[in-house]
Image (cartoon, rainbow, N blue to C red):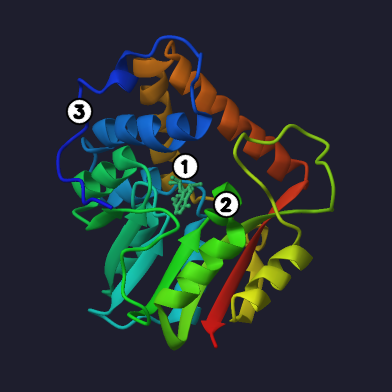
């Protein structure tokens, strides 16, 4: 575990990569492109950084729904596990006054969250550097399907929650068991809703409310404008780089699965029992 404090390192060997050989698609999407995004987004106003920093977490309506159910108090520590570059955590802080603490395995994403939003980000994956029972509220958005050992991830979340604490999840779920009809992003494993409920039960996390991301309006026009401007600038700077192309392929595959209804975003508020 470490707490990165320095900006993206231009001497990082990954920055010299020029072929897709041995490229890890998850690193490309969640580390390299996260660091590139921070470079582009740091030129924007603070309020514009939030939409550009939400990667897979749903719309403002979905985030509000979760926050209404979680009701963190102003000043309360709010865990964002698998926080990416920190847009959702910054949104939670702005809307509720809660004090986010981020965990995220990719160092480029940790540095981005610190640079863009000044949020504390601990570099950690499934093992959280947090005492048992220390957390009263938080969320983990769009993360579970990217985790190798999903029951262990949920058990670890349960470990750090206080008894009775509420926690929000967005979990991308397969619409049917078995092989998906479209190609899926590498490194992802989408449980069915039934499998997810069984895993939550096994982790002693009781579902208190649920919904679907597609029940909420998509990004509003101002959010859409920011994300397309940032995307265009990233493409202009890095479009020829194989890591950008791999990350785009990952993101396009996810978009196709969602549009085809093969995968849907399940939203859950769970309580630690
Ligand atoms: C789709 S992104 C979502 C990021 C952020 N939650 C958001 O909604 O903007 C998935 C994130 O999960 C992180 N991740 C992957 N494996 C993880 C693990 N074992 N524990 C915590 N986070 C993990 C990835 O690095 C990535 O940042």
- How far separated are the C-alphas under marks 1 and 2? 9 Å
Q: Residue at x 62, y 34 (%)?
A: 186
* x, y percent for residue 260: 77, 41
Mark number, residue 9:
3
Q: Would the CB of label 2 be found within 8 Å of ligand 1?
A: no
Mark 2 lies on a secondary structure that is loop
Q: What element carries label 1?
A: helix
Numbered badge on residue 263: none
Query: Residue at 34% of width from left, 46% of height from top?
Result: 85
Q: Residue 244 appears in which quarter of the rendering?
A: top left
In the image, residue 117 sits, relative to residue 41, either above or below, namely below
**Foreground tag (3 vs 2):** 3
Is label 3 in contact with label 2 (beta carbons under 8 Å)?
no
Which tag is nearer the camera, tag 3 or tag 1?
A: 3
Q: Which of 21 and 120 is in front in this view?
A: 21
Question: Which residue does the numbered mark 1 point to in the structure image?
Answer: 224
Split into 4 quadrants, where in the image is the C terminus?
Answer: bottom right
Q: Is residue 158 left or right of residue 84?
A: right
Answer few, some or many: residues within 10 Å of disc 2's Cα (few below 14, many 20 plus, some between 14 and 19): some
Please report contact status of discs 1 and 2: CB closer than 8 Å, yes or no. Answer: yes
Q: Position of residue 53 (x, y in %)?
A: 37, 46
x, y percent for residue 172: 64, 54
- Tell which circle, 3 or 1, labels the residue nearer the N-terminal end: 3
Question: How far apart are the alpha carbons under marks 3 and 2?
Answer: 35 Å
Q: Which mark is residue 218?
A: 2
Q: Which residue is drawn at 47% across and 62% down?
A: 140
Farthest residue to the left: give it: 6
Question: Could you say whether the residue bearing mark 3 is in a helix, strand or loop?
Answer: loop
Q: Find the distance from the CA under tag 3 to the CA under tag 1.
A: 30 Å
């Amino acid at each position: 575990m470490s707490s990165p404090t320095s900006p993206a390192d231009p001497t990082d060997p990954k920055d010299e990569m020029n072929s897709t050989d041995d490229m890890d698609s998850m690193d490309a999407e969640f580390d390299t492109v996260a660091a590139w995004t921070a470079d582009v987004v740091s030129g924007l106003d603070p309020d514009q950084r939030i939409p550009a920093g939400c990667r897979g977490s749903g719309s403002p309506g979905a985030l509000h729904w979760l926050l209404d159910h979680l009701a963190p108090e102003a000043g309360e520590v709010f865990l964002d596990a698998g926080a990416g570059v920190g847009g959702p955590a910054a949104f939670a802080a702005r809307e509720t006054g809660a004090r986010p603490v981020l965990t995220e395995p990719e160092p480029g994403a940790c540095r981005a969250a610190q640079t863009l939003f000044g949020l504390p980000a601990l570099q950690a994956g499934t093992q959280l550097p947090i005492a048992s029972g220390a957390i009263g509220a938080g969320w983990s958005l769009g993360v579970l399907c990217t985790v190798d050992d999903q029951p262990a991830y949920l058990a670890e979340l349960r470990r750090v929650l206080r008894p009775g604490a509420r926690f929000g999840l967005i979990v991308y779920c397969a619409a049917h068991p078995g092989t998906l009809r479209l190609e899926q992003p590498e490194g992802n494993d989408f449980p069915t809703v039934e499998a997810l409920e069984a895993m939550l039960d096994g982790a002693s996390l009781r579902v208190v409310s649920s919904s679907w991301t597609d029940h909420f309006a998509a990004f509003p026009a101002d959010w859409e404008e920011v994300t397309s401007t940032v995307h265009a600038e990233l493409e202009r700077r890095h479009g020829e780089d194989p890591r950008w192309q791999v990350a785009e392929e990952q993101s396009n595959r996810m978009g196709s699965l969602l549009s085809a209804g093969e995968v849907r975003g399940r939203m859950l508020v769970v309580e630690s029992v």
